[in-house]
Amino acid sequence: MSKCKWCIDGGAMERYHDEEWGIPLHNDRKQFEFLMLEAMQCGLSWSLMIKKRETLRKCFDDFDYTKIAEYNEEKIEEILSEPDMIKSRRKVEAVINNAKCFMKIIEEYGSFDKFIWGFSNYKTLVYPEHQYQPVASNQLSDRVSKILKKRGFKYIGSITVYSHLQACGVINDHEAGCPMFKKINENYSIEIIE
């Protein structure tokens, strides 16, 4: 058995793959972190996001959405002046906006976890055809993205949402030969989508 090809670097990408990616996640703060990493990644490589993850955590108060929702212009300038930070005012403003939208979902559903996992009936979805024909989005990510955009989220297109669904374990897209594919399928409630 060999790991997913995209993660083999002997370092941070591989640790992320082995310890987080695709493992069902049920923690709102981590859900927000994962979703915002995907939003910040737009137009950039995922390996860059993993390299900058600690800087992003520092700049965004460890992705505490309640604090982020209160950020003002002074805080935006502070974030943009951080030496290793991604220098995109629009993305920083989007994270602040998304924190407010995220909190509205929590207010309505009790948690973001209930909202996002409700789309899969609290099961990890396995699409066997993805093993032969990898995809960047699907009908589920189209639907979730559309709902999030209507709720005011920014930088949350279908591809970004699909990546989030993979990362937080709603979709198990580990390669069939990867030990994590089997581990997730054996230890969590799954549904095979033909």
Image (spheres, rainbow, N blue to C red):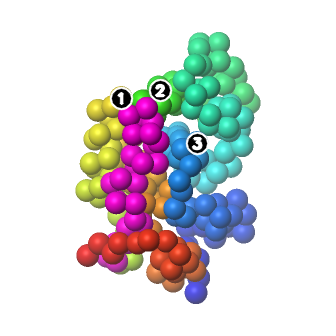
Q: Which residues are magenta?
A: 105-129
Quadrant for residue 172, please give it. bottom left
For disc 1, the marked residue is: 152
Classify mark 2: residues with Cα within 10 Å, few (<14), some (14-19) or many (20+).
some
Dot 1 amino acid type? Gly
Q: Secondary structure under badge 1?
A: loop
Quadrant of the rendering where the N terminus is positioned: bottom right
Note whether 143 is above or below 131 in the view shown.
above
Q: Which mark is residue 100?
A: 2
Mark 2 vs 1: CB contact within 8 A? yes
**Disc 2 versus disc 1: distance between alpha carbons?**
9 Å
Classify mark 3: residues with Cα within 10 Å, few (<14), some (14-19) or many (20+).
some
At x 65% / y 18%, what residue is drawn? 75
Is 26 or 56 nearer to us in this picture?
26
Is 163 or 170 nearer to us in this picture?
170
At x 42% / y 48%, what residue is drawn? 114
Quadrant of the rendering where the C terminus is positioned: bottom left
Note whether 45 is above or below 83 in the view shown.
below
Taking the view exactly as shown, the residue that stands out farthest to the bottom is 1
Q: Position of residue 99 (x, y in %)?
A: 50, 30
Res. 167 visible in picture = no
At x 57% / y 32%, what residue is drawn? 65
Res. 7 visible in picture = yes
If you read the primary sequence from the N terminus, does the residue marked by circle 2 or circle 1 appear first?
2
For disc 3, the marked residue is: 29
Residue 72 among magenta residues: no
Dot 3 amino acid type? Arg
Residue 110 among magenta residues: yes
Side (left or right) of 82 relative to 120? right
